[in-house]
Structures are given as C-alpha cells and as structure tokens.
Amino acid sequence: MSATPDLEVPACDFTVFGGTGDLALRKLLPGLYERERQRNLHPDTRIIGVSRHALDDAGYRDLVTQALFEHVPEDHLEAGAVHRLTSRLHHLAIDAHAPDGWHQLHGLLKDHPRRTVRGEAPATRVFYLAVGSDLFGPICDRLDDLGLVEADSRVVLEKPIGSDLASSRVVNDAVGRVFEEGQVYRIDHYLGKESVQNLLVTRFANTFLEPVWNSRWVDHVQITVSETLGVGGRGGYYDRAGALRDMVQNHLLQMLCLVAMEPPTYVGGDPVRDEKLKVLRALKPLAGADVHRHTVRGQYTTYAEEIGRQSTTETFVALRAEVQNWRWAGVPFYLRTGKRLARKESTIEVVFKEPPHAMFPHSEGVTTPNRLTIRMQPDEGMQLHLTAKHPGPGGIRMHPASLDLSYDDTFDERSPDAYERLLLDVMRGIPTLFMRRDEVEAAWAWVEPILDQWQRVGIEPVRYHPGTTGPAAAATLLAREGRTWQE
C-alpha cells in the first residue's frame, strides 16, 4: 500500500506519557498503526511509551500488539504493518514525581541515529501527555531540566485542562514556562472527526448556504452528543468532573464555534482559532436565575450503583445558549449531552425558519421546517431535509424528503479515526484543529458561573431512566419556546 501523496510527515520521536493507559492502547497506538498501515510514518520515527509499569521493549511490544488485535478492525490487521509499528516501539518505566528513569529518556532522545550516526537533522520531538493535568507541569519541568525541549518540539495536552478557570490557568502557566504557545497542542478529538471538518467546507466552499446562515433564516441550532454507555471504568474521574466539565466545556462548545464562527481569511492555523474565540466571547453569560431557566442537570438512576456511592454529579446536561453578535442575535443554540441514553449519536441540527408566506393553502400532507443535519456518529454524513410534492394527480400533497450524503456511500476511502488525523497534524506542525490557550480559558469563563450557581443553590440532578432521551425537563427547555428536539 503506497503512502498518501499529500501527507509528508517528518521524522519524529513520539513520546507518550501514560503509554500503557486506556487512551494510549485504545486510541493513540491504533491510530498510529492505521497511519503505519498507510505508510504515512517516516522511516526514522520512533514511538516511546512512558509509564510506571516495569516493562522492557519486548513486553511493551507484546502489550501493544494485543491492544491492536482488540481495537483495530480485523480486516485492517496486516502482519507487515503490525511488525513495522511494533519495531518502532520502546518503553521506559518513569514516575513523573520521582527522579529515576529520566536519564534513560534523555539518552534515548539524544542518541537518535539520525543525529549520532548519519549526521542528519534530528527528529522532531513530540511529547503526548495522556495523563492527568496535575502531572502536566511536573513532566514539562523534567523535560526542561534535561534539555529535551527544542525549538521545534511539541507537547500535546489531553482534556480536561484543569477543573475550572483558575486551575486551567495554573496548568497553562506551568506548561507555558517550558513550551511556547505555538508548541502547545490542546487536543479535542471531536475536531478531528471528518464530519466536523466537513462543516467548514460545507459552509465556506458552497455559496448557496452563506446567505441563509444567519438569524434572518435560521430559527435555532441543536447540538447533541449522546451515549448509551455509562461511566464504566472512568467512574473516579467522571464523578469529579460531570457532564458539563467533561463534554460541554470542550466538545460541544467547540462544535458551536464551528457553526457560528465568521468566515476566516483562510482555513488554517490562527485565523480559524481567532474566529472561534470571538464566538466564545460573544456567548451570553448564564448566571443566577438564567441558570435555573436555561439549564437542565440530570443523572441516570443507576449511576450511584455503578460508582458504588451516592453522588450529585450530573451525567446529563441540556442548556440554551445565545451568541450575541450581528449574525446570530436572537437565535437559540440548544446543547445536550448525556450517558445511558437511548442512542449513541453526535449531531448538529441547523433548523431554518418557516417560509414567510403560505403559498399552498389547500394542500394536504405534512410540512416541516427545512433542516441541515450534520452527523458525526453513527454513519458520518449530512442530510438536507426539504418539503416535496408527493407524486400524483388531484392536488398538492406535501411530503418531507431528504437529500442524504453518507461518507461511506459517497467516497471510496475510509474515514480516518479522529486521533489518526490529529496525531499526524501534530507531527506535521499543523495547529488548526487544536485549541489555543485563550479558547480554553474563554470556554471555562462561560461555563464556570453555571457550575457556581449549581453548587451555591444546591441544584441536584433530575433522575432519568437508562435507555431514555434524558430528563423530561430537557424537552420542556425547548417546549417553552414552541420547539422540540430533533430525534
């Protein structure tokens, strides 16, 4: 299989802190495997797993091989590609808080064959911190003390970056003492999804949508991320975070930004992130009585049983937001996310206003507002929902109809997993799909008053049964304004 022609990826030393953790074994290494299968990785690229486990290189290769067989589709497993990836692997046992083992990382990175044997330009160093944010600062300080951070080095930060605005600033300050802002890649895997990126192409490469992408023609926008699973093995983390911190502050607000942002001068780097920041700063604050009226906090009934204790942590959030600018004034954005719901799906619904004049007063059948549905999962794609005439003589009968774009049906290529794309972008030094510090902090600044009000007033989550669409109050949130969730 030949390399994808437009992906020139430089040699890289890709170090994963938390290299034996769930994220690394379930997403990062399978993502790197798929890129290896496509021969996108440079021949001199090495992958270094760092964890507290006492594994040698051979043991780590066995562990990763097992993970590949568990998490990569069977028809994608190729013996040659598995061998090529595992031959790149190294493992070092290091505790971030202890001095032992760091000299081995120093030696491994300093002694790359490109530099020591062939006298070529050294491999770019990427440090992926797949660990808790409390370890970001200590790890960066160690890397700095060892002289391992060079001008083209990069650090990747997994969410959550702090638990509120103050702690987020502490984490960003700690990382910023070692890495320049241009070297920091804050990852949100939703931004790597094909359909999310296609939203930019849909908006800015098709002229027919731009004239109606505003408050004159859009009635409202719905953004839904629902899961059928519960917290599983993430109970400890999730009970400290909750749905608002875990999903709304990053994933859902990032999708809102892509829907609402103004056209950038070009799609790349800071122009996109500048426009997203403007949206975050234009969000109408939710505080005090507005929190009660415009947010819903829920918890599925078996949550306490799953985590083994009583808890007031929310597993469901629905809320109403507004973007206070010229384009979107008065248009509500409804966001919802939750666990143990009826379906696993991630969608954006742009619901347009009804026609200004009823031209078919004697027609029969059903009419519904035009909608553009962007599906991130399952079955990535888009649907444009229209009203059409039902075939036949004897008058006009209205009937809902859809124009459907399924990526699987339309394109021969498979849609890469979000992490595959984002990992390559890090290696190539492309920051467009990563969050800047000011974006993260602007999102926290908007979310924090909601958290504060919930805590101050003691708003406990409303119970909902697993397998449903969530609390009834979420439907009421829209019903008060004559709207319904698009199921």
Image: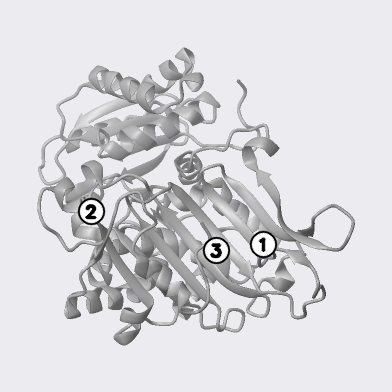
Q: Earlier in the sequence, mark 2 or mark 1?
A: 1
Residue 309 in picture, x, y percent from top left: 9, 53
- Most extreme residue toward the right is 393
- Most extreme residue toward the top is 79
Q: Residue at x 32, y 36 (%)?
A: 24
Q: Secondary structure at mark 1?
A: helix
Q: Which residue is mark 3?
A: 258
Residue 282 in picture, x, y percent from top left: 48, 80
Mark 3, Cα crowd under 10 Å, few <14 / some 14-19 / many 20+, is many
- Most extreme residue toward the front is 394
Distance from disc 2 to disc 3, alpha carbons, whole Å, reads 26 Å
Q: Secondary structure at mark 2?
A: helix
Q: Secondary structure at mark 3?
A: helix
- Mark 2 and mark 3 residues within 8 Å of each other at the beta carbon: no
Horizontal side of 434 relative to 372 (left or right) equals left
Quadrant that contains the N terminus = top right
366 or 60, nearer to the observer: 366
Distance from disc 1 to disc 3, alpha carbons, whole Å, reads 9 Å
Amino acid type at image mark 3:
Leu
83 or 386, nearer to the observer: 386
Q: Earlier in the sequence, mark 2 or mark 3?
A: 2
Please tell me how many numbered marks the rendered image carries: 3
Q: Residue at x 25, y 39 (%)?
A: 18
- Mark 1 and mark 3 residues within 8 Å of each other at the beta carbon: no
Q: Which residue is mark 2?
A: 238
Residue 366 in picture, x, y percent from top left: 69, 63
Amino acid type at image mark 1:
Arg
Horizontal side of 403 relative to 438 (left or right) equals right
Residue 203 — which label?
1
Distance from disc 2 to disc 1, alpha carbons, whole Å, reads 35 Å
Q: Nearer the viewer, mark 2 or mark 1?
A: 2
